[in-house]
Image: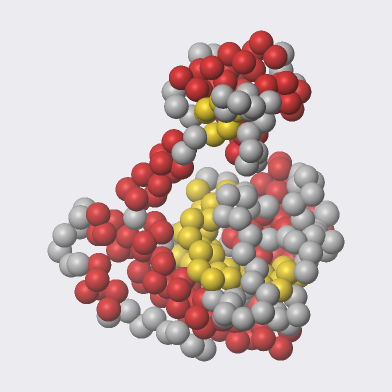
């Protein structure tokens, strides 16, 4: 298979990932700007490998669970979600809002775990499968602010400020505004997004390191998000304190993630976790 064919196959998988009920061959071909015959060959190859299935009645193509299985297998080997869930659950209890953990890899972030802390009223709970729009989310801005400014701006400019409708009314639209937001993030110690990622929502986020040492690299982000009426300005100091506590605890727990699968047998994860100063209130 040529490099072009591989790229087309990945684009096809990405297109199908957004179709809960599958999609017809002609629709996929039009969306990918490919001939119907070429699209059919790609679908046949992916079907043969078990990544795609075709509904015998409607003829629509859809993804199987094989990609999900591969993703979970990779996460299990890394021990990523389990290592952070205890901290994420504590953050959700402290803030009573929706919390997420994202990890940095290359020039992007991926959400890998979540915890819902809202017990009454509106519950904000976006899908985990959506990509992180770096310039339009507190998660993205927190991570960008941890990078050298020129590198952060280069990454966002390479992707562009257009996000196919996946943003709110206050989304940032130019380099100067983004630079100001990143400076504010560094000054505050956390990133803030008010109706930037989605209408009617507010999010706050901070980064955490791969270990307790101040020189450890940034491993990912922790975020708290909820409806605008509940995430009002008077609550943000309390939530910022909870985020700072969670970031410190996550840095302490992060090196233990591989011990959960037995690669470092000297001290059990359970015993180590029990000694961490994880707080459940601010």
Residue situated furthest top in the rendering: 37
Whether 252 is drawn above or below 10: the answer is: below
The percent coordinates of residue 93 (x first, y second) are 50, 81
The percent coordinates of residue 149 (x first, y second) are 67, 57
Colouring mode (rainbow / by chain / secondary structure / one colour): secondary structure
Whether 148 is drawn above or below 237: the answer is: above
Residue situated furthest left in the rendering: 266
Between residues 101 and 107, which one lies in front from this camera angle? 101
Between residues 85 and 109, which one lies in front from this camera angle? 85
Between residues 196 and 142, which one lies in front from this camera angle? 196
Residue situated furthest front in the rendering: 57
Q: Quadrant of residue 36?
A: top right
Q: Is residue 242 left or right of residue 210?
A: right
Q: How many marks?
A: 0
Whether 160 is drawn above or below 204: the answer is: above
Q: Is residue 141 visible?
A: no
Whether 8 is drawn above or below 177: the answer is: above
The percent coordinates of residue 54 (x first, y second) are 56, 25
Which residue appears at 25% of the width and 54% of the height?
Answer: 261
Q: Quadrant of residue 145?
A: bottom right
The percent coordinates of residue 107 (x first, y second) are 57, 46
Which residue appears at 20% of the width and 55% of the height?
Answer: 262
Q: Quadrant of residue 50?
A: top left
Which residue appears at 39% of the width and 71% of the height?
Answer: 86
Between residues 108 and 34, which one lies in front from this camera angle? 34
């Amino acid at each position: 298979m040529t490099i072009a064919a591989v790229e087309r196959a990945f684009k096809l998988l990405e297109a199908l990932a957004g179709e809960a009920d599958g999609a017809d061959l002609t629709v996929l071909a039009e969306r990918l700007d490919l001939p119907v015959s070429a699209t059919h060959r790609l679908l046949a190859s992916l079907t043969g490998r078990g990544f795609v299935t075709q509904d015998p009645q409607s003829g629509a193509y859809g993804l199987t669970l094989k990609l999900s299985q591969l993703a979970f297998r990779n996460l299990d080997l890394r021990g990523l979600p389990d290592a952070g869930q205890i901290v994420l659950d504590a953050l959700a209890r402290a803030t009573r809002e929706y919390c997420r953990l994202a990890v940095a890899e290359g020039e992007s972030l991926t959400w890998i775990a979540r915890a819902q802390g809202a017990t009454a009223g509106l519950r904000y709970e976006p899908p985990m499968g959506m990509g992180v729009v770096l310039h339009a989310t507190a998660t993205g801005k927190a991570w960008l602010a941890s990078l050298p400014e020129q590198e952060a701006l280069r990454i966002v400019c390479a992707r562009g400020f257009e996000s196919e409708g996946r943003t709110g009314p206050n989304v940032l639209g130019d380099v100067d505004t983004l630079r100001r937001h990143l400076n504010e993030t560094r000054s505050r110690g956390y990133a803030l997004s008010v109706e930037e990622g989605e209408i009617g929502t507010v999010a706050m986020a901070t980064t955490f390191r791969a270990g307790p040492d101040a020189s450890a690299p940034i491993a990912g982000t922790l975020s708290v998000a909820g409806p605008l009426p509940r995430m009002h300005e008077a609550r943000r100091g309390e939530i910022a304190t909870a985020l700072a506590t969670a970031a410190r605890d996550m840095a302490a727990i992060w090196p233990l993630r591989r011990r959960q699968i037995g690669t470092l047998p000297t001290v059990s994860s359970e015993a180590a976790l029990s000694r961490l100063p994880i707080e459940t209130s601010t």
